[in-house]
Image: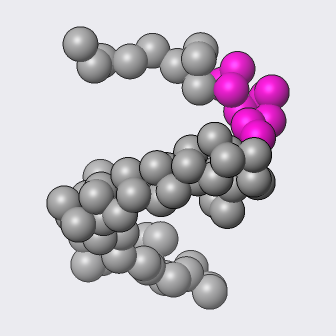
Amino acid sequence: EEPLAGDHPVRTLPGFLRSAHHAGALDIAFKRMGDMVLEDMDLIDRGLPPLRSKRAERETVSRMRSKPSDRN
């Protein structure tokens, strides 16, 4: 569970590095992600290679499909 308690044992591990990851949940980040997808789709539509989108690995796709979702 996050955030880790100040006395959590993992904090004493050698080389442990905490990293904030809240920025991905900001509205501006979601907008930028959407813009990047649209830019890549435009490139693909024009017969050009996308800048960011990559072909999904079969193993990754099968793992994602097999996960239960609590979304409606």
Q: Would you say residue 27 sits in the magenta stretch?
A: no
In the rendered image, the vertical position of residue 3 relative to residue 72, given as above or below: below
Q: Nearer the viewer, residue 10 or 57?
A: 57
Is residue 51 left or right of 3 when viewed as pictured? right
Query: Residue 69 at what x, y percent from top left?
Result: 38, 18
User: For residue 55, which quarter of the picture?
Assistant: top right
Residue at 47 percent of width and 71 percent of height: 10
Can residue 24 be seen? no
Residue at 76 percent of width and 54 percent of height: 49
Q: Residue reaching furthest right?
A: 58
Query: Residue 33 at what x, y percent from top left?
Result: 40, 57
Is residue 70 left or right of 9 when viewed as pictured? left
Is residue 41 left or right of 29 when viewed as pictured? right
Q: Would you say residue 59 sits in the magenta stretch?
A: yes
State which region is magenta: 55-63
Q: Nearer the viewer, residue 40 or 71?
A: 40
Can residue 52 be seen? yes
